Amino acid sequence: MKFSATVTLQYDTPFSPFSAAEYVQGLDWIKASGLEGAELCISHYNGLDLGLVKAQLEERGLSCSTISTGQARGLEGLSLTGVSQDLQEKTQQRFRQHIDAAAYLGSKVTIGLMRGGGSVSTAQEDLKALREAMLPLADYASQKGVTLLLEAINRYETAMLNSAEATLDFVVHSLGNPDCVGILWDVFHANIEDIEFRRSIDAMGKKLQHVHLADSNRKFPGYGHLDIAGVLKYIEDSGYGEYASFECLNLPSVKAVREETGPWVASVRAVSEG
Ligand code: LER
Ligand code: MN
């Protein structure tokens, strides 16, 4: 298993202990903490020098694990479903740019909140609209050799695809199980929605392609009530070789997140290797 942490390139996020202006320091911190990659939050490509970012990663021997795309939902109202035709087209175009960037960086692309919010009463139509929006993106991603990560997100943030099992069912039965679409399983969301962690991990099998790490209260691992090290050991023992990526709030403090990430990863590695 590889580890990464959130780094934001343009707009600040509560999931990174560094501001966008400090993103190079964020990369230095990831390297010094012994992680393999950065999960890059990219909102848009206007004025973004991706060649520079790639060089900054390479100088440090780091990879980009996945491109986190959701900021543009809040900032620009972009969404694959439930918005005007114009915004849907703009969202398709933005995802094609993310896929091009991922092909260049050798990363994956996340589809999280950009799926749209949906509603419980329109669930069937919402998922049909999501299927229609995702199929052309899956075709494009497949041509470019990029994996799309569809994230299971809890019901307080979207009505669509809350649990691992619902997301798996959608990928397999609605999208036709394309190789280029995997599942992003976020332990914080799973603690709200899933029946049992090991059951989800077993059900997802090889479709599990990325993991987000945060404790039950979205604090740094160890500050809530989840046995995250145990969950990671189970995932690792199932043959998982992709990323586990920190996406926790800066709680209990920025200082704690900065100082504890390296030792926490080292302790998890010691357990899985021992
Ligand atoms: C995105 O990865 C996620 O987990 C959302 O909850 C962000 O708000
Ligand atoms: Mn997440």
Image: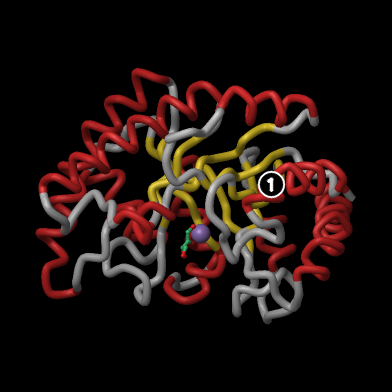
At 50% across and 62% down in the image, what residue appears?
199
Residue 200 as seen in the image, left or right of residue 171:
right
Q: Is mark 1 within 8 Å of ligand 1?
A: no
Answer with the quarter of the image where residue 188 lies. bottom right
Secondary element at tag 1: helix
- Quadrant where the N terminus sits is top right
Residue, x 74% and y 78% (percent of image)?
252
Is 195 on the left or on the right of 173, as rendered? right
Neighbour class for label 1 at 10 Å: few (<14), some, many (≥20)? many
Q: Is residue 19 visible?
A: yes
Q: Tell me residue 106's x, y (percent).
A: 56, 25
Q: Quadrant of residue 14?
A: bottom right
Question: What colour scheme does the image use?
Answer: secondary structure
Quarter of the rendering containing residue 246: bottom right
Of residues 101 and 164, which is closer to you in this image?
A: 101
x and y, in percent, of residue 127 in the image: 18, 55
Image height check: is 48 above or below 153? above
In the image, is residue 53 above or below residue 158? above
Vertical relation: 117 (above or below) 41:
below
- Residue 125 spot, x, y in % from top left: 10, 59
Tell me which residue sits at (45%, 73%) in the image: 195
- Percent coordinates x, y for residue 190 in the rendering: 49, 68
Q: Is residue 219 left or right of 258 when viewed as pictured? A: left
Number of numbered labels in the structure image: 1
Comparing 247 with 274, the one in front is 247
Type of amino acid at the residue the image marks with label 1: Tyr
Outermost top residue: 143
> Image point 48% across, 33% down: which residue?
47
Residue bearing mark 1: 23
